[in-house]
Amino acid sequence: MSKNKNIVLGVTASIAIYKACDILRRLNQEGFSVTVVMTEEAQAFIRPMVFQNLSGNKVYCSLFDESSEWQAEHISLAEKADMVLIAPATANIIAKLACGICDDLLTCLVCATKAQVVICPAMNENMYKNKITQGNMRRLESLGYRFIPPIKGRLVCGKIGIGCLAEVDAIVEEVKRML
């Protein structure tokens, strides 16, 4: 079922970034080819080399990565993807996508892809429940973007609330179902 399916895993700056490593590992075990695109801010939490070692693929971090040959990577990655999975997804990336802002590799890639886009929010409960965030998610859903909602758990601030990244198993099962 998953053979030859390509997933671009978009990783943003959330403390839940460590779960992206498990998501990547599980998707690989299921036979998916996974390429990671990290936002610049995500690199403050984890180095790209971790994802490169787990995936066996180059990790993309910038629209203007220096390489030996020029390539419009946001276009080539967008065309290659069967799915773009953003996990964890911050309120910032959700807002950028809802407004059509294309100011980094991940947002440009999402704008250029015809693949399904699946977003897994992870943020503080107040940010998640904020009317603007909720409106941004409704807008994206109306455009065909899919969400795997966060769960209740211990947040970075120490409180218990909704905003924790969905369980890795739930994300992987939903990806398998969609593809």
Image: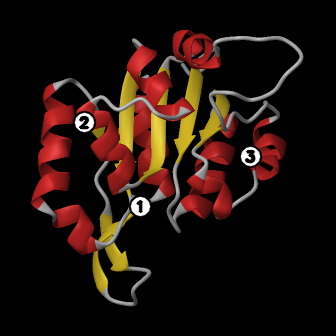
Q: Nearer the viewer, residue 83 or 37?
A: 37
Closer to the eye: label 2 or 3 = 2
Q: Which mark is residue 165?
A: 1
* First reached walking from the N terminus: tag 2 or tag 3: 3
For residue 149, side relative to residue 35 (left or right)? left
x, y percent for residue 19: 57, 59
* First reached walking from the N terminus: tag 2 or tag 1: 2
x, y percent for residue 99: 24, 34
Circle 2 sits in a helix, a strand or a loop, which is it? Answer: helix
Amino acid type at circle 2 is: Ala
Circle 1 sits in a helix, a strand or a loop, which is it? Answer: loop
Say which residue appears at 31% left-offset and 65% top-offset.
151
Q: CA distance from mark 2 to mark 1?
A: 20 Å
Circle 3 sits in a helix, a strand or a loop, which is it? Answer: helix
Against 25, is 106 above or below?
Answer: above
Amino acid type at circle 1 is: Leu
Residue on which the image places disc 3: 51
